[in-house]
Image: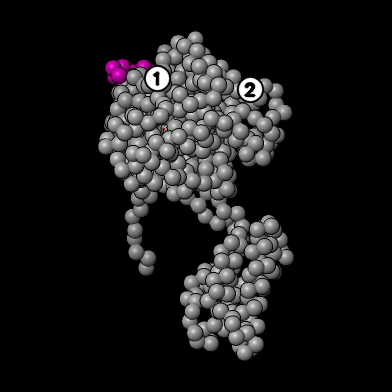
Amino acid sequence: MTEVRKFQAVRGTRDIVPPESALWTRVERVARDVFETYRFGEILLPIFEETDLFARSVGAGSDIVGKEMYTFADHDWLDLEALRRTILEFPLGEPSEPFQASFASLSRKFVDALFQATLSSGIPGTPENKAASERLSEHVHKLSQYLEDFETFPNFDIVVTGQAIKQALKSIQLGPIVSLRPEATASVVRAYIEHGMQTLPGDVKLYYMGPMFRRERPQKGRFRQFYQIGAEVLGQSDNPGIDADVIEMVLVFIERCGLVGHTLYINSIGCRDCRPKYVELLRAELTKVKDKLGPDSQRRIETNPLRVLDSKLDSEQAVIETLPRIGDHLCEACREHFKMLQAMLFMRQIAYEVNWRLVRGLDYYMRTTFEITAPGLGSQNAICGGGRYDGLVELLGGPPTKGIGFALGTDRLILALQEAGKGEAASGGAGVDAYVAWMGASTYAVAVRVARTLRDAGFSVEMSHEEMKFKKSLGLAARLGARFAVILGDNEVAAGTCTVKRMADGTQATIAERELAGHLRT
Ligand code: HAM
């Protein structure tokens, strides 16, 4: 017999259950209401995409793509995959002949199976795949020839050929490699291109909400499955008024949810012209103070010096403050754009702080970047991040297009609301208007009908399908927080009435069944 096992949600994931889920529903409703007043339309996106989409947009060298994505091969060639694994695990350099023959035979088997699979057009016929399978066939052929007649090939090196076979095997892609989405901007841009949205009138304004996945170390406000509410504007203009509008919209949303005490930080990280020069300058300056930095920052001097500015290590703060600031190294156009953005925010009476260290961890940003932090969240206090990504559409094969957007971390916004005592929508949404209490087999049918009539009229109604004494039913109605109990016994059914008890004060009235909805509204 199978052993009984209890399961728990996987580390970094969780259930959001009533009544807390009602607060989530409220926040999502506020987002929809606010975003639609700015003419944003909702886009529903796939939860997984080709890994390469994220590698090209978020950046192959970013932490997100480099170490945090949930990635898997999405194809049906399980036999081929298993065979490949067996060949790759074969220790090379084993001198015994049967061993070598078995390596060669498995490799031949793979070549044949790959050929058949390619004929049935199940394997991507990319130039990389063609080149790799040609290399593979060539090396396997050489190995077979050698095994048939050692003497003709005195200089043959089986280890070198074995390694070449393994290398070629590794580079063959049996099907798409996909990842659970770590963010949604890349998907929105892919969809924009795929659906030719550049032909739509005006700027394309899209919003989305749903789960994202990053394999980070879980802690307060940081999950492996977390939720974002985000919005993107794609179009021909990079006017800073658009940036300010997007920022205004997210602030209206946050404020309408009831949050106070949050801070908006903005920065400009320049463009393709000015940023590389600044990055080089920063790298040179960082190299001079390398000894004063920790191992992570030391590594980043080479890989991504901008990320050193993100460091939260106390010991590095004094050094970082002495570094050159990007604001002093922007090109004329970027400087003007940033100045205009600030004027536009001022015009809207939006308070902000310039934070020259706000660089963000995604490669697609240029010029405007922004973040909103909330009190009460500890180290994971960024509730929203966003910025401009002109050029990303082109990078992914679309027409020249400008883009800006943000994503708000729903988990963190909810946490901040709860910390501030603003989680009250929790009980409101789940309230019960009427509890239908019945007794007697013949009254059940009437109770079902009454419940349906009240629900059709928009009331939230609960009833039990087990017959219970009235005392027990009314006790349950009280515990559920019902506003009314609708009591149905044999007498009521015979008279075509109900006894309605107002739970708050215990007053009772006899009401005709057809007047029930009207009575509950009073
Ligand atoms: P991001 O800064 O990576 O930007 O994420 C945005 C927000 O998602 C963060 O500020 C945070 O509130 C939330 N978040 C991120 N990771 C986690 C996590 N592990 N647990 C809980 N919450 C998390 C983006 O994703 C960009 N796509 C934003 C954007 C849209 N830029 C332009 N358009």
Task: Say which residue appears at 68% left-offset and 56% top-offset.
Answer: 126
Depth order, front residue of 337/274: 274
Depth order, front residue of 353/430: 353
Question: How would you rate the neighbour count of disc 2 (Cα within 10 Å): few for under 14, some for 14-19, many for 20 or more?
Answer: some
Instruction: Report helix, strand or loop for mark 1.
Output: strand
Give the x, y percent position of residue 343. 50, 12
* Res. 59 in view: yes
Q: How many marks?
A: 2
Tell me: residue 68, above or below residue 359.
below
Taking the image as shown, residue 252 lies to the left or right of residue 427, namely: right
Magenta-drawn segment = 504-510
The residue wearing badge 1 is: 353
The residue wearing badge 2 is: 237
Task: Say which residue appears at 66% left-offset and 77% top-offset.
Answer: 141
Instruction: Report helix, strand or loop for mark 2.
Output: loop
- Establish whether ligand 1 lies closer than 8 Å to the Cβ of label 1: no
Depth order, front residue of 335/358: 335
Look at the image and say whether residue 418 sits in the magenta stretch.
no
Q: How far apart are marks 1 and 2 (CA)?
A: 25 Å
